[in-house]
Amino acid sequence: MNMAFVEVCLWMLLAFVISWTIFHVTNKMNKATKCANVAAKERRDGGPDVIIVGAGVGGSALAYALAKDGRRVHVIERDMREPVRMMGEFMQPGGRLLLSKLGLQDCLEGIDAQKSTGIALFKDGKETVASYPVDTNFPYEPSGRFFQNGRFVQRLRQKASSLPNI
């Protein structure tokens, strides 16, 4: 094979790769610009400010907090039925304090949540009981709650969906 022919082929291949890359990068940039323009138009036209995927504990609480802050929130969830799990949840006093700060403390009511004032440790036939310390920063008695996850999630979803901008 002639060396000049190989060199021409390599230059043509390089030109093709550069052209192809420029075309696809430009095309992606145009698509991104179009998506940004659509998103901006939706915000002007009353579309959501925030889209949350998942209406579990985190998604529902976040949706509620953002909506209370004045944002338009759209939540996407594949199944709005009560989650069925063969396990319970335990929320420490600090979690209850956070719920209180978010205005979601009432979501622990009416779901058969059981109060816990401390923990007991058992090892080698010995027992140690540790109560939660009294803390004046808590707006209520510092205690934890045991509850069924699905009931709690449904209460959070109901509370979040009660706001008009969700």
Image (spheres, rainbow, N blue to C red):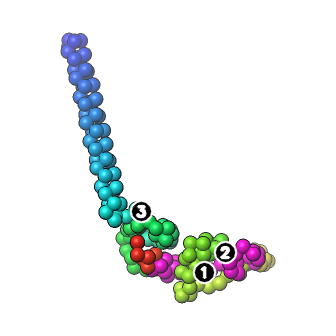
The secondary element bearing badge 2 is classed as helix
Camera-near label (3 vs 1) is 3
Quarter of the figure with residue 162: bottom left
- Where does label 1 land, which residue? 146
* Nearer to us in this view, 87 or 138: 138
Question: Which residue type carries mark 1?
Answer: Phe
Q: Residues within 10 Å of mark 1 (few under 14, many from 20)?
A: some
- List x then y, in percent, for residue 117: 71, 81
Q: Is-magenta flag for residue 124?
A: no
Question: Which residue type carries mark 3?
Answer: Val
Whole-number angstrom distance, CA of label 3 to CA of label 2: 30 Å
Residue at (41, 67) in percent of width and height: 73
Would you say the residues marked 1 and 2 are in contact, meaning their CB atoms lie under 8 Å apart? no
- List x then y, in percent, for residue 7: 25, 16
- List x then y, in percent, for residue 127: 78, 78
Quarter of the figure with residue 103: bottom right
Residues in magenta, as a range: 131-159
Q: Is residue 133 left or right of residue 68?
A: right
Q: Is-magenta flag for residue 138?
A: yes
Tell me the quarter of the image containing the N terminus.
top left
Q: Is residue 143 left or right of residue 158?
A: right
Question: Which residue type carries mark 2?
Answer: Pro
Q: Is residue 35 above or below residue 137?
A: above
Camera-near label (3 vs 2) is 3
Q: Is residue 166 above or below residue 23?
A: below
Would you say the residues marked 3 and 2 are in contact, meaning their CB atoms lie under 8 Å apart? no
- Where does label 2 land, which residue? 93
Say which label, 3 or 2, has the lower sequence index: 3
Marking on residue 50: 3
